[in-house]
Amino acid sequence: MEKRWNILKADSAKVQLLQDALKIHPILCELLVQRGIDDFDAAKKFFRPSLDHLHDPWLMKDMKNAVDRIEAAFEKQEKILVFGDYDVDGTTSVATLYQFLKQLSPHIDYYIPHRYKEGYGVSKIGIDYAKEIGINLIISVDCGIKSIDLIAYAKELGIDFIICDHHLPDLILPPAVAILNAKQVDCTYPFKELCGCGVVFKLITALAQVHDLPTETYLRYLDLVATAIAADIVPVVDENRTLAFFGIQKVNENPSFGIKALMELAKQVPPMKISNLVFAVAPRINAAGRMDDAKKAVQLFIEPEYQSALAIASLLQQDNLDRREADTSITEEALEQIEMDPTHIHRKSNVVFQSHWHKGVVGIVASRLIEKHYKPTIVLTQSGDIVAGSARSVLGFNLYEALHACRTHLLGYGGHFAAAGMTMSFDKLEDFKAAFEIAVAERITEEQLTPEIAINALLPLDNISMNFYQIISQMEPFGPDNMRPIFLAQKVYDNGYTKLVKDAHISFNVTQGKNSVKGIGYNMPQHIELIKSGEPFDLVFQLQLNEWQGTQSVQMQVIDIKKSDLT
């Protein structure tokens, strides 16, 4: 698939000032300025994270109300229920708050709604369960900000609510005794992009201060916070970057039994990076809620014995294998459905349906289909007596707006710019497909239908060195708004040692002037003829460390290749 190359710019005056202050390579200064780091103090804070950089939890609106209500519950020996979502952010949030509160009161329980029986967020079944077991206070984590009617219902039953959430609030808020959410319009908390587990971390920090507990009583959960940050794809800047930095440090030095067990089963060894959490640890946690019951994930994190944690992690491992199998088979069936339709080449969207597809993986499958056919995509399946599914967008296209235009064909829908879910009756399926295609075609541009690679800087091969790589490594942890840098090398040549490995991967050996650099390009055999042609070509790549027989060197991980423009 042809990709657009977009070379990002940086303010040259700011780059020069930063280089004068830091005395490092100008390309590194470009990368920093692109990230909003344009003076010595900002760079020092960026390269030397400290727990002192974390913001005061009491700056968050309603923090005092939340702490006071929890303290009152402790004094009256009231029962508290921690209620969370079934994904990574939700289950780590529940495990963190549940364990911390258990240190202060024996009357703590937790609840995770069943994805298919109850749906997302606060549920009536959950509130009724809370009433049944005598709960006086529910603390919802990673959900609740939209649950106006349900929280009003809980209030009628005599159950108070504290909401810890990070999703965007509506104008009307639920009738909770306290709402901890930095995105509230009148909340002056200085950082707005915490994940759910991050909000919980602020709450337990405040509670620890009230009880004069040592910092270890809340810092011990940083590995769970880092896992939630990694999985929830929140910006890895400011407080999130600090929490992720020290959380990954804990993962590598002294992980909780749950994280350690998942690492063992996923064959992950230190040093772990945020990418290891994203691609190896998080999917195993998520799989519990996708394929079965997410309560297992919470149980994994609260187990006091390693062998018990390992046994539960094995169940999540099996859930993940089942998820992967379903994901692979459904993706193959969906691709066949798209490609058997002769009109698909001209369509601006893809909508596929099969009644037997597993509801838990349709969102993942939609993302996989976009990798092959880059268009807004919806994957639908049967859910009871209706059709339900997930949608994923392409860069820059407002998916929610397109769905809103088709609302007359839907029973319900929700989501945001890039991802959404919807339900409809069977008799509306074909009408919806037609309406969605029209809605997308009217709004999408040709540019949005071509995937883009955002390139941070031109990098001549003679600038690639171990020192250059080590400074880039200090920019970790990488993630949204602080992505691993992507570079462009222009007019390079094959030096005769480039070869195809296993008929799929290219082992690079390229020259530019007098300089030669090695690299690897995964799953790009179609480019081998261009490389061997003797003509110059351009490479888009990231830098990585290669270790061979005890020797370390910096190499390229190639992302894309094009013939050089010789004009």
Image (cartoon, rainbow, N blue to C red):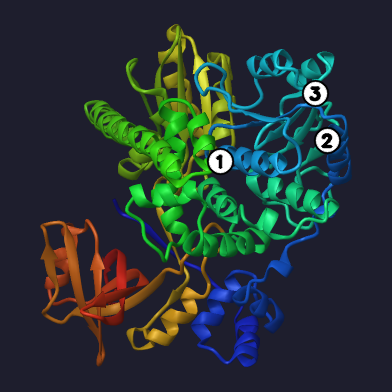
How far apart marks 1 and 3 lie (CA) works out to 23 Å
Q: Residue 171, located in which quarter of the rendered image?
A: top right
Q: Name the residue under label 1.
A: 302
Q: Quadrant of the C terminus?
A: bottom left
Comparing 492 with 303, the one in front is: 303
Mark 1 or mark 2, which is nearer the start of the sequence?
A: 2
Residues at circles 1 and 3 in contact by the CB criterion of under 8 Å:
no
Q: Name the residue under label 2.
A: 74
The residue drawn where x is 41% and y is 47% is 262
Amino acid at pointer 1: Ile
Residue 36, position as x, y percentages in the image: 65, 70
Comparing 522 with 310, the one in front is: 310
The residue drawn where x is 57% and y is 51% is 229
- Left or right, 159 with reference to 542: right
Mark 3 or mark 1, which is nearer the start of the sequence?
A: 3
Amino acid at pointer 2: Phe
How far apart marks 3 and 2 lie (CA) works out to 11 Å
Residues at circles 2 and 1 in contact by the CB criterion of under 8 Å:
no
Mark 2 or mark 3, which is nearer the start of the sequence?
A: 2
Amino acid at pointer 3: Asn
Mark 1 residue crowding within 10 angstroms, few (<14) / some (14–19) / many (20+)? some
Residue 147, position as x, y percentages in the image: 72, 25
Mark 1 lies on a secondary structure that is helix
Q: Name the residue under label 3.
A: 136
Residue 419, position as x, y percentages in the image: 52, 36
Residues at circles 3 and 2 in contact by the CB criterion of under 8 Å:
no
Q: Is residue 430 above or below residue 352?
A: above
Q: In this view, does 17 lie above or below 60?
A: below
The residue drawn where x is 47% and y is 30% is 289
- Left or right, 545 with reference to 222: left
